[in-house]
Structure formats: structure tokens, C-alpha cells
Amino acid sequence: MRYTTALAVTAAVVGGLLLAPGTAHAADQDFYVTATAEGITIDVVRAYYMNPVVHLRAKGSNTRVQTIKDFRYEASDSSSTEGSFTSGPVKLDKLGLYSVDVEYRGTDGESLVRKDTATLPYTLKPVLSGITSSKAVSLDSLGTTVEADLQGLDPRDGKQTPLANAQVDLWVSEKSFTATTDGKGHVKAPVTFTGTEAGAQVDVGHKTATGLSVWAKAKVQVSAQAVKIELDPGSRAVSVPENGTVPVKGSIKRVAADGTLKPVATPMSLHVIGRPYTFKSTADGRFSTSFKADDDRTADVTTDRQIWLDQKTSASTVADVPADVHFPGQPTEQYGPGAPWTVRFNQYATLYHTKVHSGPKLPTGGPVEIQFSPDGKAWTTRKTFVATFDTGFDQSVPAERGYWRLRYAGTDVPHGSSDVLKVDRVVPAISEFNAHPEPVKRGGQLTVQGRVNGMNSPATPVARATVAILYRPTSSSAWVKVGTTATDARGAFKKAFIVDRGGDWMAVTSRDGWGLRAESRVDSVEVTG
């Protein structure tokens, strides 16, 4: 139900007189009026004792031509003050547009009049009949002709007369065009489908100058054609690991009216039975899709529900998922104070199989390789051990920046691999350190320099590392920090000092997030003079 906020009251009736606008009045009603030849409807928010009376007058005239007092009220629900007042059909002497004025009682019982609440189009109502199509359509013949009769229904006597030279709108799918009726109100228009529509129908409509409209559907018969679906050789029988991708490629052809096979030249919806998605063929009749196989499966490719092709044919893709070795769990990178930097595989191997084997017994375990790759592409084996399926193992190897994984190396089942661990960390090591010149004169300059590289990758410089320089005077056991510096992009560092006594020199890096640091060798320097 629609409502509109009450407009300013233009007049009020008191003692049979129409008062001028601005006369004092109580609270107004809130209602909305709909007017057709079939009746007047007043949707009201606060019904109370509205007691509506409708006055009709020709558009632009102040003379009333009819008053309607008989209304039936129906509430929205049993407890609501909202509802609708509805009259019976309107009968007038002349066709035309009529203004609708409503006389009613306000919320405090006062009499009010609201003018021009709606416009009643009391004109010929358009009626469509005799809608037909000349012939069925198919992918070989997409055109047909739609015919219909357009007449105007006179609300005064119910008689119909042809609407000659009237514009008729026709819609096919999302495209529209117009046609014009002849002197007898008959329209005849050719229409052409694309062959991809979900339904073969033509919407036919007409709207009069007074706003009255009519719509109807012309249903067109479709001759669905037989289909041949052919899979490419690589999509008929496919062996993939568990959850591997099965390619489904092929072509779809239709049996034309002359019995020959022709490519389906328009995209068609296809689907793999049991899979919740569809895909489309291309304009040359080719299609390509895929699905994941979690076990042995036969997938049937067939046409999706549509009107142009029948659904009596399909093609099968047979997916074979052989036994495979899985490695649940994740490898980890480990390092701690006093412990070496390692990659650890504390997990287990399990044998997955999708079918009952009638041949040799399944293996109970086999060789497993720990593999490394600097780029995640070319792999080399760093260690091999024997694992028992479904039994835990704990293996470690010295760490190195790059990629690490497990791989089953047995020949009895396919070579399954574990998840890959990417190691980005560089554990620092001061690979070079020197304090010079040796000896140095008292009050002279001593230069300390060195280089920080990765512990397991000497070729990897550690840039922007903070390095502390420590000094221990001769005959002392305590180290003293005498300065700090930082490495450059090549991992090199350098710092100069003025010295007046001999002693030992050493460099250390700052502790990282794991509480680790690198220490250089100790270099002893004698001071002379």
C-alpha cells in the first residue's frame, strides 16, 4: 500500500459552503488516491471516520459531472487504522480526462475537501488479442513473424473498436523495436532470435497517450536440435593426484535440419553433472573447463537447461586418482643460543589411496628425501631416510636460505611431496675481522674493519647490521665497548681509533629477535713508542 503525506487543505465544507484556502481547520488525513475506470481507490493511513465522497469534473473545468458516495472499506489487518476505500466501476457520459476531488472528514470530525488528488483517464482501454507466431524457430531458422490485434475498450458500454495506426512495442530478449497497426488494428512484425535466449517469447505492448497500457506475451515454439558432445583425447581418461585438476576440453556440434553436423556457432551453457557450475562454449563450438578430483570419478558433460538444444546426450571424463603419499604437517626453521640453525621435519608420512588394490600389497613405508632449492624450481636432495607410513619421524638438516620440502622417493607409488618451507632468515657471522696496523705507535690511529655474512651462506652479505667494537687492555680480563658502526650494502664495516696502549680487539653484532649475535675473532695489537 502506498501513502503520501497530507497536502495543505485547499478548502473546507461548512454548512454546504466551500470555504476559501487558509480557513482554520483541525488535523488532516493522510491518504493516496488511484483512479481508473474500474473504480476509485483511497489508501488511507488513519481511517477513523473518513467517510469519503469523490467528485469528478472534466480536466480544466470547475463543474462537477458526477459524485461517488458508495465505498467499501477494508482494513490492512484487524488492529490497524490503515486501510483502503474502494468504489465500483465509474460510468460517465463522455470520454476524457477527469480531475478527482475528495470530500472527507478530518481526524477531529471536521469536513474537508482536497482537490486534484488524482486524474482519471476515462478513455479507450487498450486490449491485445489474437497473438500468434507464424512458425517455430531453431538454430537453423531463427526468424518468425508475430501478429496481434489491438483494440480499444470503451468503458461506457464495453464495446471494442480497432486502434488503427497505433504504435506497438515488441521486445525480444533485451532488444526492442516498434511496429504500427493497420486500419483494422492488426500488427504484423518479423522478429529474429539470437539462439542464446533462455525462453522463446516476444513481449508485445502498447501505451496510450493518456497513460493506459497493455502487455502480452507471444510464445514461440522452438525445435530443439540433437547434440553431439566430443571430448578431446586428453580429457577422456585422466590420471591426477588427489585434488588434482582434471581438464575438460572438447567440442559441441548440433544435428542440423539436413542431418549434417555443424558447430554450435553461439555460446551455449554446459555443465559437468554433479558439479555446481556451468560454463559456455565459444562461437566455434569449442569448450574448456576443469574440476578438482578428490577421488576416482566419472564426470558427464552435458548441455545445461535451455531451449535450443536437447539434453539427451553427454560425454564422460574418467578421472583416476592413484595412490599417493602425503606429508601432514609443516617443516619448521629452528635456531637457539648454543644450537645450530636447522630445518626440522617433525611430522609423518601417510599413504592415500582411492581404490581397493587387487594387485601387489600396498607398501608400508619407503625412502623419503629432504630436498632444497634456491629458487623453488630446481631441487637437490640433502638427506634421505626411511619412513614408516602413519608413524612419526623427526629429521633435521643444516639450514640455508631458500626452499625446503620432503619427497617420497619410492617406486611403488607416485612421488608425493610435502608443503614447501621458505627460509628467508640470515644468521649473521663475522667472516672477516682485522685491526691494523700492527704494531701501532702510541697516540697513532688504529683501524678496525671486517665483514658480516650469513652463517650458512658466506656469499650473502648482511647489510645495515649494527656492529659494536670491543677492546680489552693488556693484563685485563674485562671487555669495554669503545664504539659502534654499521655494515654497508656489501656487509663491510670500518672504524678508526686513537690508541695509547696495547690490547685485544673484537667486533660483535647486536642481538636479533632470537637473542643471537655474531662474534669476530680476537685480534691482539701491540702499541710501541
Image (cartoon, rainbow, N blue to C red):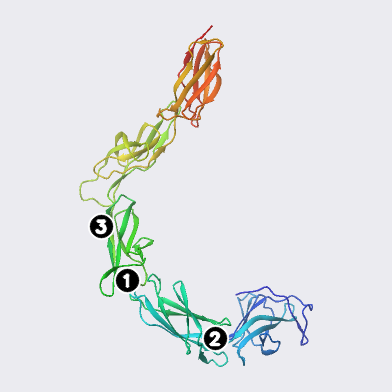
What separation in Å lies between label 3 and label 1 (alpha carbons)?
24 Å
Q: Callout 1 environment at 10 Å: few (<14), some (14 to 19), or many (20+)?
A: some
**Towards the viewer: 206 or 45:** 206
> Is 409 placed left or right of 68 in the picture?
left
Q: Residue at x 68, y 83 (%)?
A: 101
**Left/right of residue 269 with respect to residue 155 in the rendered view:** left
Task: Choose the circle earlier in sequence order: 2 or 3.
Answer: 2
* Residue with the mark numbered 2: 125
Residue 57 position in % (x across, y down): 67, 87
Q: Residues within 10 Å of mark 2 (few under 14, many from 20)?
A: many
Task: Return the disc, 3 or 1, that comes first in the chain's sequence.
Answer: 3
Q: Secondary structure at mark 2?
A: strand
Q: Which mark is residue 233?
A: 3
The secondary element bearing badge 1 is classed as: loop
Disc 2 + disc 1, Cβ < 8 Å:
no
Rendered location of residue 404, percent (x, y):
37, 37
Q: Amino acid type of disc 2?
A: Lys
The 10 Å Cα crowd at callout 3, few under 14, some 14 to 19, many 20 or more, is few
Q: CA distance from mark 2 to mark 1?
A: 42 Å
Residue 109 lies, with reference to residue 431, above or below; the image says below
Q: What is the three-letter code of the residue carrying label 3? A: Pro
Q: Which callout, 2 or 1, points to the residue nearer the camera?
A: 2
Residue labelled with disc 1? 310
User: Picture coordinates of residue 3 (x, y %)?
Assistant: 64, 74
Q: Is residue 200 above or below residue 250?
A: below
